[in-house]
Image: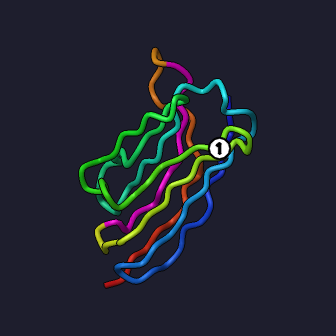
């Protein structure tokens, strides 16, 4: 099972930007899709964005136009560029992998905290 390590979280003021990185322990070339999820205190984990091997992307409505997901297969890394951050974006952000179309997202990183102050 692929191991995932997130980084890049931190404290930022509203309107600011952060870039999260997720580095895999092995090649992600053959992984069907990579994704970012987040979980705020007292809330369920929610999908933020996904990217397939063919670079097709999908975003939660709440982040469309502000966040951009990308993957660099050569570096075994997935990124989440977050712009125009809002206090409601505050959460622990998790990276995940979906091996194939037949499987759900199943490999998870340890998470990175993003805190947006107003």
Q: Is residue 1 left or right of residue 108?
A: right
Name above or below for residue 110 compared with residue 86: above
Residue positioned 50% across, 55% down in the render: 80
Q: Which residue is identified by label 1?
A: 72
Q: Is residue 29 left or right of residue 37?
A: right
Quadrant position of the C terminus in the picture: bottom left
Q: How is the image coloured?
A: rainbow
> Residue 28 versus residue 118: which sits nearer the camera?
28
Name above or below for residue 43 compared with residue 103: below
In the image, residue 92 lies in the stretch drawn in magenta:
yes
Residue positioned 58% across, 43% down in the render: 71
Query: How many neighbours does mark 1 have within 10 angstroms: few (below 14), some (14-19), or many (20 or more)?
Result: few
The furthest residue to the left: 61
Q: Is residue 53 left or right of residue 39?
A: right
What percent of the width, then of the height, locates residue 82? 44, 64
Quadrant position of the N terminus in the picture: top right
Name above or below for residue 102 compared with residue 29: above
Q: How many marks?
A: 1
In the image, residue 74 lies in the stretch drawn in magenta:
no
Q: Main secondary structure of the magenta part?
A: strand
Quarter location, residue 13: bottom left
Residue positioned 64% across, 24% down in the render: 30
What percent of the width, then of the height, locates residue 52? 49, 31
What percent of the width, then of the height, locates residue 5? 66, 51
Residue positioned 40% across, 45% down in the render: 49
What percent of the width, then of the height, locates residue 23? 68, 48
Give, as a single range, the part of the protein colored magenta.
89-100
* Callout 1 secondary element: strand
């Amino acid at each position: 099972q692929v191991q995932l390590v997130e980084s890049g979280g931190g404290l930022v003021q509203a309107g600011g930007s952060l870039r999260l990185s997720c580095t895999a322990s092995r090649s992600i070339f053959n992984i069907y899709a990579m994704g970012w999820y987040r979980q705020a205190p007292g809330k369920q984990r929610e999908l933020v964005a996904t990217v397939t091997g063919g670079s097709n992307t999908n975003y939660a409505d709440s982040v469309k136009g502000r966040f951009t997901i990308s993957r660099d297969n050569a570096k075994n890394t997935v990124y989440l560029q977050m712009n125009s951050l809002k206090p409601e974006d505050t959460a622990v952000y998790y990276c995940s992998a979906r091996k194939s179309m037949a499987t759900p997202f199943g490999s998870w990183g340890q998470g990175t905290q993003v805190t947006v102050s107003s």
